[in-house]
Amino acid sequence: MILKKKFILLFFLYSLCLFSSFSQVQGITRPKLMEEDGHLFDKMVDAYNQKDFDKSLGFASQLISKYPVSEKPDYYYLYLSRGGIYIKLGRYAEALKDIETALGVNPNDPISIELRGSVYFRTGRYSDSIAEDTRALSLAPQKIECYNSRGEAYCKLGKYEEALADFTEFIKRNDTYALVYKNRGWVYIQLGEYDKALKDISKAIQLDGDSSEYLKSRGVVYLYLKQKKEALADFEKALELAESDSEKQEIFNYIQICKKK
C-alpha cells in the first residue's frame, strides 16, 4: 500500500510539472506520508484528476498544515503538489511561493526547478523559463520533457533554430509523443519548410488521432503548399471537432479562404 502511494505520488508530481501529458523522469524517490493521512493524499490526487482543482487545493493545504516544511522538511514535495495545483488555477504568484519554499529545502531538485520554469513560461518570463529547463536538464538529463518546454519558450522568443534543435533532440530520444511533432511542425512553418511541417503534423495525427488543433495546423500547411482541396478537407473535419466558438470562427475563416477561387 505504501509503495503504491509512492508511485502514485511520483506520477502526480510529474503531471504537475508538464505543459503536456508526458514525463520521462526516473529514479527519483520521495518520503512516505504517514499512513493515517494517506486518504487525504488520495483525495487530492482524485480531485486533481477530475479537474476539480479547488477541491484538490483544499486537500493539499490540509496536508501542508499537518506537515509544514518548518517542522517536516522532507515533506517539501507537498508544496510542489500545491504549487502545481495553483498553476492549474492560474494563481501563479502563490504557485511560485510554494515552489520556492520547496527549493529552499532542496535547491537542486529538478522537479522543483522545472515547475518554477513552468510558472515563468506562463507569466511571460521566457528567458527565465529557458534557464530553468537548462538547469533541470543538467541535473537530470533523463528529463527529456524539458527539451519540449524549452523549445516552446524559444518559440515565444522567435528563436526558431534553437526550438527546432530542442524538439528534434526530444524526438531522437522518444518518438512517440504527438505534441512534440506538432510543435516541430509549427517551427518548420515559421522557417518556410512546409514539406517537413506536413510530415511532422501528419505524424502527430497518426500518433494521437484527429483533433481540431492538429487538423487546423495541417490545413494551414496545405494552404502554404497551395493544396486547397486537402486543406479544405482538414478544416471541415476540424470544424466538426472544435469546441470553443473562437476556434470555430478561426476554422470557418480558413474554410472561406479555401473556397475562394
Image (cartoon, rainbow, N blue to C red):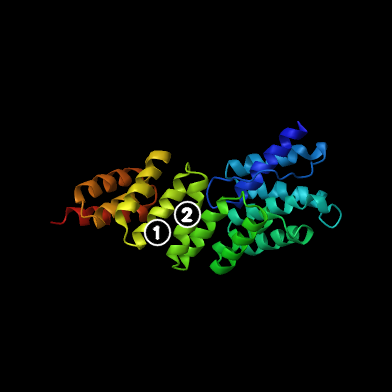
Q: Is residue 94 above or below residue 202?
A: below
How many discs mark residues in the rendered view? 2
Q: Nearer the viewer, residue 164 or 16?
A: 164
> What residue does disc 1 label?
187
In which quarter of the view is residue 127 placed?
A: bottom right
Q: Is residue 123 above or below residue 15?
A: below
- Tell me, for residue 83, which label it has, or none: none
Q: Element under label 2?
A: helix
Q: Which residue is mark 2?
A: 167
Q: Is residue 183 left or right of residue 51?
A: left
For the residues bearing labels 1 and 2, Cβ distance under 8 angstroms: yes
Residue at the (46%, 53%) spot, across then down: 168
Q: Residue at x 36, y 56 (%)?
A: 246
Gap in Å between the C-alphas at discs 1 and 2? 9 Å
* Camera sees residue 124: no
Image coordinates of residue 252 in percent, x first then y, are 27, 53
Residue 18 as seen in the image, left or right of residue 180 = right
As helix, strand or loop, the secondary structure at mark 1 comes to helix
Q: Residue furthest left?
A: 261
Farthest residue toward the right? 71
Question: Disc 2 residue type?
Answer: Phe
Q: Of label 1 and label 2, which has the lower sequence position? A: 2
Instruction: In this rendered view, identify the residue nearer to me: 119 or 221.
Output: 221
Estimate how packed mark 1 is, as few (under 14), some (14 to 19) or many (20 or more) residues with alpha carbons within 10 Å: many
Q: Residue at x 75, y 45 (%)?
A: 30
Residue type of the residue flagged with mark 1: Val
Q: Residue at x 46, y 48 (%)?
A: 179
> What is the x, y in percent for residue 64?
77, 51
Q: Determine whether, in the image, residue 191 is placed left or right of residue 22.
A: left
